Structures are given as structure tokens and as C-alpha cells.
Amino acid sequence: LDGITWTQVFTANSPASITGVYSMAVYDEGTGPALYIGVGNTGGTADGDVWRSFDGVTWEISYDSASGNNRINILTVIDDTLYAGTSRASGSGEVMYYNSTNDWGSQVATREVNGIDKFGSEIYYVSRNAVFILYSPGGSISSIAGGVDGNLVHSLRTFSGKIYAGHNHATINRLANSTDPTSWEYQNIPSSTTIPNMRELSDGHLYLPIIQTNNATLWR
């Protein structure tokens, strides 16, 4: 465990249309912590599966993409539930949830789901260019809770009393933040960028990974 020597512990190459691992999370449903990973592709084949491992070596299917999801964009744990956000070939997606009493329940979203997080007492998710509110697993999904003025919202994260959304807006890419998801403030970030995910680490900072043309940077 020196951070230098790496060992391959998982391979998903059947069917051949699977192109990568897109998300990860550690979750314990009461049988011990397991690493969950979401796989899939950028095309239209329904390969969006979730695998899990209790030892990092032996893997089993937790969710099979029978419902037509082609990619698991995000896995995140909120309270006692594991959530997944997906994409479908049609351009829609799902908010899925898994715990000791729900074996991958789901609610269809109008567009692909790229971020899920809790802010205050509510759970929010981003789908394409808007933020929606999800009242509870299996409950109803409201109308738009707060429209983020952007073409594609890539990520969502709560941090230090605010909720943040990383998104593209035409040729201007911005980080949106809000203390009330019905109204947003915007901060421009370098052009031709995407914020694919945001992480709060144990050092107390929020980290922003940035994808740029011919460049990759990390901000905090």
C-alpha cells in the first residue's frame, strides 16, 4: 500500500461494449462494508451494472442493467441508503436506491442523472440542466426545485452550508452555489472545462477536478 505499485482486481469486458468503471462507493447494508462500482459505456447498449466486493478481489453483480441503463454515472451513500444515478440511450436516466429493505428500487428521470446529494433535510439530484428534489426513496419527485442556468450539469455536492453544481453554459462554464436551491449564484471557471465530480476530503476542503482541452487541473 505504497501508492506506487498497483494490482488489477476487477475486469468487465463481457459484453465488449463495456468501456469503463464510472463510479465507486463504499456501503454497508448490515453485512459488512463492501466496495460498489458502476460500469457501463458511452453508447446505447444496456451495460450499466453495479458490482460489489467485500474483499476487493472477489466480485458479484448487485444490479443488472435489465431496465435499459447504459451507464452508472454516480454512486453515493446518503444516510443508510446507497444511491445510483444512471444514463439511458434515450437520453433519460434513473435515480436508483439500495438498502436492506429495497433491492434497487428506481424512479425514472427525464434526463441522465449526474449527481445526487443531501442538502438540509432533502435529497437533490441533477438531471441535465436542472436540480430536482427527491423527497424519499420510493417517494415522489417534485417539479424543478431550482433551475441551474446551464446546458449540462455534471456534478452536485453540499459543502459548508451550501449546495454546489458544476455545469456548462454555452461557452462559459461555471460553478453554481446556493443556500436555497430556488436561487443560484455563479462563479466562472476556466473556459472549455467540465467539473465531473466534487469531493470534500478529510482536510476540510472541497476539491474540484477540472477537465480542459489538453489540460487537467485540481482546485480547492
Image (cartoon, rainbow, N blue to C red):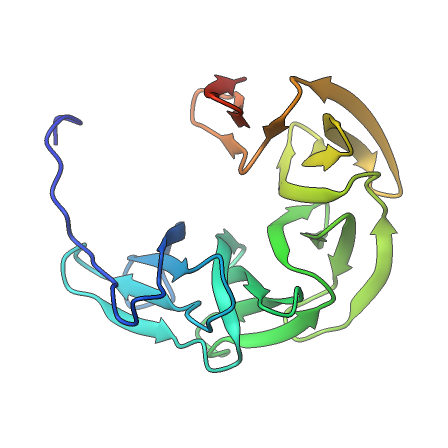
Query: Does 211 appear above or below 98?
Result: above
* Res. 32 image quadrant: bottom left
Please state the total of marks drawn on the protein image.
0
Q: Nearer the viewer, residue 48 or 115?
A: 48
Query: Where 156 sits versus 104, above or below?
Result: above
Q: Residue at x 38, y 60 (%)?
A: 39
Q: Position of residue 185 (x, y in %)?
A: 84, 27
Measured from the top left, where is residue 17 in percent x and y? 36, 65
Kindly identify the residue that appears in the image at 80 percent across and 33 percent down: 179
Q: Is 170 left or right of 203, judged from the image as shown?
A: right
Q: Is residue 123 left or right of residue 106?
A: right
Q: Is residue 165 visible?
A: no
| Quadrant location, the C terminus | top right
Asked if residue 134 can be seen in this view, the reply is yes
Residue at figure coordinates x 43%, y 60% from the top left: 41
Residue 11 falls left or right of residue 38: left
Q: Position of residue 40 (x, y in %)?
A: 41, 62
Of residues 206 and 186, which is closer to you in this image? 186
The N terminus - image quarter: top left
